[in-house]
Amino acid sequence: MSQKVIVKTFDILETIKKYSSKYKVDLKNVGFSITDISYIHKTKLSNKIIKKESILGIKSRQDDVNQIQQKFNIKLFRKDKAKFIISHRVFINKDKTEAFSVVSPKSKVRYYDNLEKDLIEYFNEEKAKRKMLVSFFDDDMIRDISLFVEYVKTNNNRLPKNTKICIASKANYIASVENNLSYNYLPKNMGKNDLVNCYCFVKAKQQVILYTQGSKGKSGLDICGNYMKAKDIRVKEDLSFNVSKNLEIINDDDTQSQVIAKIDGVLVFKNEEFDIKSILSFSSLDFKAVRYFNVPLDIEDVVINIKSRREFENAINSGVILKAHNINIQGDIDAGVTIVAVNLSCDGNIHRSAILRAKNAKLKILKGKLKAENATIKTMENGLVIGDSVEVVRSVGGEFRAREIKINFLHSNNIIKCSKTLEIGIMKGDNNDIHMSMNADMELKADIKRYKEELLNVKEIEPRNVPIIKRKYAEHKKKAQILEAQIGDTSKNPKEIQKRILLNQNILNALKGDIDALKHKHNLISNLKKIDELLYQTKIILKNGWNGDNIVMYDYIHKKENIRATPKKLIKYISLVNNDNKDTIKLT
């Protein structure tokens, strides 16, 4: 059985652990109260007890160690039922000039008359456990606890959100602040060394750079009793760059200067000067040279022009990520490049691992992946295009998924998935698989996926049980009307009637759930069948007739099958028709 113990200690947490081990008390059940505190001024040369009121007058010394230590008289005991339970985390800033507690809504705190006094005692104990000076730098703590108590009272003992309580602040040590040049338009992990390699859209009147002159701090004690000497700071430096007429430097006072954008555009840094441009031209882009490129797609006025420096050199080298409304590329795109644009053009080779996304794309040779609403491609070489409307001059080993596709010269080993109209000028190769499929429609594909996923989650009901469920539902519906009519009948037991009504309603609810599941399944299947019926509206147009060993297939969504044909040379039109409830491929 545990007992009350009175000890003197510099380390409360360590003392609590020893008590827990000795008296077999769970750590969370060990309580303590501070009965007295003595203060020791510790230096390299001596340790001496000083008065509390002398502490803030401690001056700088040459010793390596110069701090105030607290020696506590504490009473340890097994905790009784707590008046409140505080679930919180304590955070101390880097300079140890401020600490605060974030109190979680999981805490259980009820208002009572002495709540404020008890909370001050509680947080002083929390500070003591973390070796923060007790009864020092606590003005904000007393204020915040008072507000917290009022918050608990007005919210009916509930804590709807995390609450921040400052438990130590305004130490008489004030850290020195160095001169600071903030490039506010860049991500936080980037700075001066990245300027020439960053391109970012800014708006007129936006503050893009802020220069703040440093300030000398004040030597003194931090919240943990360590004597800290304020560092010397550098003399104010001038802004070491120029700005074009599109930006303005504003000197607010002797301590602060800011650079403001005067127009919308892309902020660039070149030859020690900042400028804002709406048209950017590059002699090739390289991942090592371009650290950051951020131009929102909805900024229509920005145009990016990229041209390779010389013949047989990439216009965009590997690893570059590029995003802008208008992008024009003269030259090749290397491996691992990602480009997102509204309007995109490229007159070179596009590597097979490059990924492109655009609303409108005009490309020369596509070996990579493209997703676009409208795409015009001169040559497809084992590339992939997903879109709405796609037009290609020549394709070898290409893969297509689109609503409307037009290919002037179809060579070998292509996979074509089309959801509306496919037009082929001349078939010059073999081993081409042509699928007319609603999965090729970008909008319908999302619906198809959703319908199929919902079908998997619908409650499965055996067909033989369907008429039974419907009959039982009708019977219990009628029974509910009879029971409702008996409520006012004085010859009946009202409690028994209510009991029978409740039981009948539970059965009705269960049966209705089955009927709703049947209806939902029927609707999902009906939707998939309607999507399959769109295959009758598709068509294949062969300008120069069929040629070679190639297959055409119509893929069903609901039936999970396909029908296929290998047309002959004279065929110029292919469609799907239904005769006597049987689908056939019409070749004309």
Image (cartoon, grey):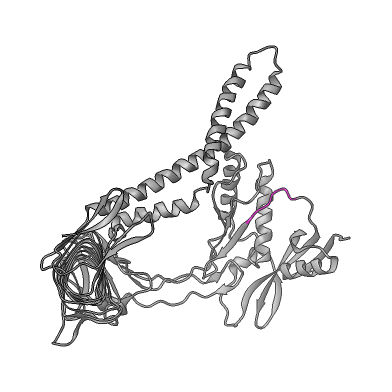
- From the image, give the main secondary structure of the stretch colored magenta: loop
Query: In the image, is 91 to the left or to the right of 581?
Result: right
Query: In the image, is 375 to the left or to the right of 401?
Result: left
Q: Kindly tell me whether residue 441 is visible in this rendering.
A: yes
Judged from this view, the residue extending furthest toward the top is 490
- Range drawn in magenta: 82-87
Q: Quadrant of the N terminus?
A: bottom right
Given residues 38 and 551, the one toward you in this image is 551
**Numbered disc total:** 0
Judged from this view, the residue extending furthest toward the left is 544
**Percent of width and height locating residue 328:** 15, 71
Residue ID at (49%, 39%): 516
* Among the 4 quarters of the image, the one containing residue 485: top right
**Percent of width and height locating residue 439:** 32, 59
Query: In the image, is 508 to the left or to the right of 179?
Result: right
Given residues 542 and 68, the one toward you in this image is 542
Residue ID at (35%, 77%): 235
Q: Kindly tell me whether residue 329 is visible in this rendering.
A: no
Judged from this view, the residue extending furthest toward the right is 1
Given residues 425 and 232, the one toward you in this image is 425
Residue ID at (35%, 74%): 190
**Percent of width and height locating residue 338:** 28, 73
* Among the 4 quarters of the image, the one containing residue 440: bottom left
**Percent of width and height locating residue 357:** 26, 67
In the rendered image, the vertical position of residue 259 relative to residue 520, given as above or below? below
Given residues 535 and 59, the one toward you in this image is 535
Residue ID at (40%, 76%): 233
Q: Quadrant of the C terminus?
A: bottom left
* Among the 4 quarters of the image, the one containing residue 130: bottom right
The answer to whether residue 290 is magenta is no
